Structures are given as structure tokens and as C-alpha cells.
Image (spheres, rainbow, N blue to C red):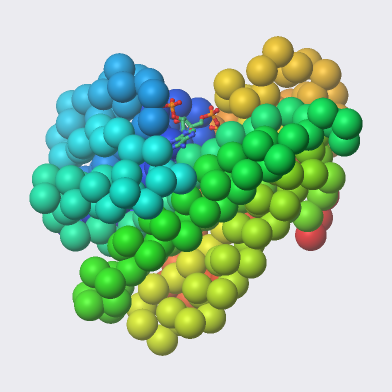
């Protein structure tokens, strides 16, 4: 496992699901971890508590990552408590299920703001420090829906495809500065986002089951440990597609 002792990580949307597993894995690897959430304070505190119990620093930090002022405030709090941020995992996201006829402008705007603009805001906020120290690892949790159609809707496809574009744009411009930017693209992971459709969804996956948040966390840690991999998308999808 990559040794992340002395590193500081911020994981957005880490109170539950995939973000929680990534935060715990970063803690296990020795990093100090900031556990962002928007509503579920107790869940985020529990994740931070588990990391502290394992002997590493951690902080639960509330912010709606679609809001610039919240992101600025979050990054200040994390840096004051844990130190400069070396690792950013843009994981927070929403999947509002909509068909063609019931998709509204408000759904579209909220999805783009939470899933895509948030990654831009958080990246911009941590980049000056990473560039000053010539080290950074940024992992964007996109989705198989960036390239496939998926179940959620066209607004979700657009937000996740945009995230992959953002990744390439930053990766190309930061490669010479010791900062890598990659996507991990899960498909059909057993979290609250899948809701009640677990069995129906699992039947569609070649390996015959949903993925686990820990499997996505493992791919994320692999990417963080690799200094030569940048601008890439790693699919964790049980063989659903092979692009
Ligand atoms: P989840 O279980 O629904 O958890 C979502 C997390 O995001 C929670 O921690 C939530 O915080 C946080 N969050 C939501 N809106 C936020 C905001 N505005 N600001 C800050 N935090 C916010 O979701 P998940 O399944 O773990 O998904 C995590 C990421 O993986 C998402 O980007 C999702 O699109 C992507 N993904 C998931 C799947 C899948 O099959 N599950 C597949 C492909 C991609 P609170 O707990 O405080 O509400």
C-alpha cells in the first residue's frame, strides 16, 4: 500500500458511500484526512472519529461544495487544522433520476453545480498550495455515465462527461509541476445512490454483483500512488463496458 504519512487529504462527500471508503483508506495509508459533508454531520464525525482512532488526524468539515464561499471556508479550516492539502478527491455528487419529460432546468443546474462546478471550485482552491510545493494528487470520481447512457439521466451524463474534460484540462497544464489529475469512474456501486434497485441493477453487471465502495477506494489509492499516470480514467465497473 502507498505510504501517505505526512500527507493531508480532503475528500468531498465523505460522510457515506464511496467518499467514506476513500477517506478511511487514505487514513489507513497514513494521511491526515478532512471528511467533507453537507448535511449528515454525525456520519461525517463518525468517519473522522474512526480515522483518529486508527492514529491519524482527521476533521469533519461542512460545506456545500457547489458554493464558492463554502469551498473557500472549508479549505481554510482544513489547512488551519491539518496543514496544506496534498490530495484532493472530488467525490461529492448527486444523481437525481429524471426522464426526458420530467427533467427541469433546476435539476440540470443543480446537478452541474454539485457534480461538476464543485470539482472546479475545490481544485482552484487547493492548486496554489500544491503548485507552491510542486506536489499534488487530484482524483475526480466521475462515472461510467460520462461515456455510457446509464440510468440517471442526460443531466447526470453531462455533469460526469464534463468532469472528465476538466480532468484532461488540468492534467495537461499541471504535468510539469508534480501534480497529477485523474478520474476514477465507478459504475453501479452499492451505496445510497443505488437506492432500492439493487437486485435489478446487479443483474445487469457481468461480474454478477454491485461493486463495493472499498473497491472504488482501492482504485483511488492506486491512482494516488502513481506519479506517472495523469489525465486518465480508471473504470471500476464489473466489466460493464471496456472504454
Ligand atoms: P451517496 O452515497 O449518495 O453519498 C453522497 C455524498 O456526497 C454524501 O457524503 C453527501 O453528503 C455528499 N454530498 C452531496 N451533495 C453535496 C454537496 N453539495 N456538498 C458536499 N457534499 C455533498 O453517493 P455515492 O454513491 O457514494 O457517490 C459518490 C460519487 O460517486 C458521486 O459523485 C457519484 O456520482 C459517483 N458515482 C456513484 C456510483 C454508484 O453506483 N453509487 C456510480 C458512478 C458514480 P451528506 O451525507 O452530508 O448528504
- Can the viewer see residue 30? no
Q: Does 139 sit above or below residue 100?
A: below
- Can the viewer see residue 176? yes
Q: Position of residue 41 (x, y in %)?
A: 31, 22
Instruction: Answer with left or right where residue 186 lies relative to residue 203.
Output: left
Q: Position of residue 160 (x, y in %)?
A: 66, 51
Residue beneath the point at 56% across and 66% down: 167
Q: Does 146 sit above or below residue 59?
A: below
Say how many tags the image has: 0
Question: Farthest top residue?
Answer: 196
Q: Position of residue 43 (x, y in %)?
A: 35, 20
Question: Farthest bottom residue?
Answer: 176
Q: Does 159 sit above or below residue 95?
A: below
Instruction: Answer with left or right where residue 4 lies relative to residue 6.
Output: right
Residue beneath the point at 56% across and 74% down: 169
Q: Does 178 sit above or below residue 18?
A: below
Residue beneath the point at 66% across and 18% down: 195
Instruction: Answer with left or right where residue 107 lies relative to residue 43.
Output: right
Q: Position of residue 150 (x, y in %)?
A: 80, 39
Viewer-closest of 6 and 34: 34
Residue beneath the point at 50% across and 28% down: 17
Question: Farthest left residue?
Answer: 80
Quadrant the C terminus occupies: bottom right
Amino acid at each position: 500500500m502507498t505510504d501517505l504519512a505526512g500527507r493531508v487529504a480532503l475528500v468531498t462527500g465523505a460522510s457515506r458511500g464511496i467518499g467514506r471508503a476513500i477517506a478511511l483508506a487514505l487514513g489507513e495509508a497514513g494521511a491526515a484526512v478532512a471528511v467533507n459533508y453537507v448535511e449528515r454531520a454525525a456520519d461525517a464525525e463518525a468517519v473522522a472519529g474512526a480515522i483518529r482512532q486508527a492514529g491519524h488526524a482527521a476533521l469533519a468539515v461542512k460545506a456545500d461544495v457547489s458554493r464558492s464561499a463554502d469551498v473557500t471556508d472549508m479549505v481554510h479550516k482544513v489547512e488551519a487544522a491539518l496543514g496544506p492539502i496534498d490530495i484532493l478527491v472530488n467525490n461529492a455528487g448527486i444523481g437525481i433520476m429524471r426522464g426526458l419529460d420530467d427533467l427541469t432546468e433546476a435539476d440540470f443546474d443543480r446537478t452541474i453545480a454539485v457534480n461538476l462546478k464543485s470539482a472546479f471550485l475545490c481544485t482552484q482552491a487547493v492548486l496554489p498550495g500544491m503548485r507552491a510545493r510542486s506536489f499534488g494528487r487530484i482524483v475526480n470520481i466521475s462515472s461510467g455515465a460520462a461515456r455510457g447512457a446509464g440510468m440517471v439521466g442526460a443531466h447526470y451524463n453531462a455533469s460526469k462527461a464534463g468532469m472528465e474534460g476538466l480532468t484532461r484540462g488540468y492534467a495537461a497544464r499541471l504535468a510539469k509541476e508534480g501534480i497529477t489529475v485523474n478520474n476514477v469512474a465507478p459504475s453501479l456501486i452499492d451505496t445510497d445512490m443505488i437506492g432500492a434497485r439493487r437486485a435489478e441493477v446487479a443483474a445487469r453487471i457481468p461480474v454478477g454483483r454491485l461493486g463495493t465502495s472499498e473497491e472504488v477506494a482501492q482504485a483511488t489509492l492506486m491512482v494516488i500512488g502513481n506519479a506517472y499516470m495523469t489525465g486518465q480514467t480508471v473504470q471500476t465497473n464489473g466489466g460493464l463496458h471496456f472504454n
